[in-house]
Image (tube, helix red, strand yellow):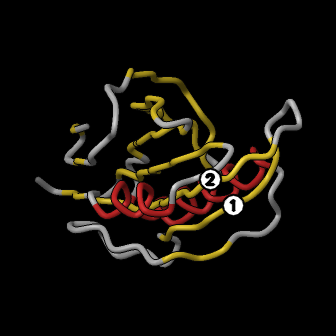
Amino acid sequence: MEGREAAVLLPCKPSAHARQVRLGEDSVKLTLQACQAAGMTWGMASADVVDPTRVGAALQALREASAGNLGSPTEAALPLKVAGATPQAASGRAAYAGRRPDGQPVQAQVAVFSHGTVVYQATVIGERLSAEAADTFFGSLRLGG
């Protein structure tokens, strides 16, 4: 998947979606590319928050939304290095365990990071995650060309 100066290897052909979402105090257009393969859903979302002072809050809002959507109050921090990313204290990768709205167990790994005023969220979610596949996915993230 490429776009908005981001590239990531997805194991399937993604479909594109866009919608207005609330990130902190701002309403922004969030663009998502997502697909399903090997019992997992893979996705990359991005939004331009325009104001550099709002990037940290937007990244934190993405992290909190991920945990909240899974009903997972805790997260395990995982290493994240994205070539070309703008350094931000709120950037990071985390693993979550929770439940879908239908009560089924779910695992997820989520990375949030930025380039300039554009915030990104890369996600893999499924009943059971392949650690190797997730590491390959997150290791393929690149920004800035």
x%, y% of residue 57?
57, 62
Residue that appears at 41% across and 55% down? 133
Q: Which of the two discs, 2 and 1, labels the residue nearer the N terminus?
A: 1
Q: Which mark is residue 108?
A: 2
- Alpha-carbon neighbours of circle 1 within 10 Å: few (<14), some, or many (≥20)? many
Q: Are marks 2 and 1 in contact (CB under 8 Å)?
A: yes
- In the image, 118 versus 103, the foreground residue is 103
What's the residue type where badge 1 is placed? Answer: Tyr
Q: Which residue is mark 1?
A: 96
Q: Which mark is residue 137?
A: none
Q: Secondary structure at mark 2?
A: strand
53 displayed left or right of 138: right
Image vertical order of residue 8 relative to residue 86, above or below: above
Whole-number angstrom distance, CA of label 2 to CA of label 1? 5 Å
Considering the image in quadrants, where does the N terminus appear?
top left
Q: How many marks?
A: 2
What's the residue type where badge 2 is placed? Answer: Ala
Image vertical order of residue 81 relative to residue 139, above or below: below
x%, y% of residue 56?
51, 66
- In the image, 38 versus 75, the foreground residue is 38
- In the image, 120 versus 13, the foreground residue is 13
2 displayed left or right of 53: left
Q: Secondary structure at mark 1?
A: strand
x%, y% of residue 140?
26, 58
- Alpha-carbon neighbours of circle 2 within 10 Å: few (<14), some, or many (≥20)? many
Residue that appears at 34% across and 59% down? 136
Residue that appears at 86% across and 30% down? 102
Residue at the extreme left: 145
Image vertical order of residue 65 relative to residue 131, above or below: above
105 displayed left or right of 22: right
Q: Which quarter of the figure has residue 20?
A: top right
Residue that appears at 10% across and 53% down? 145
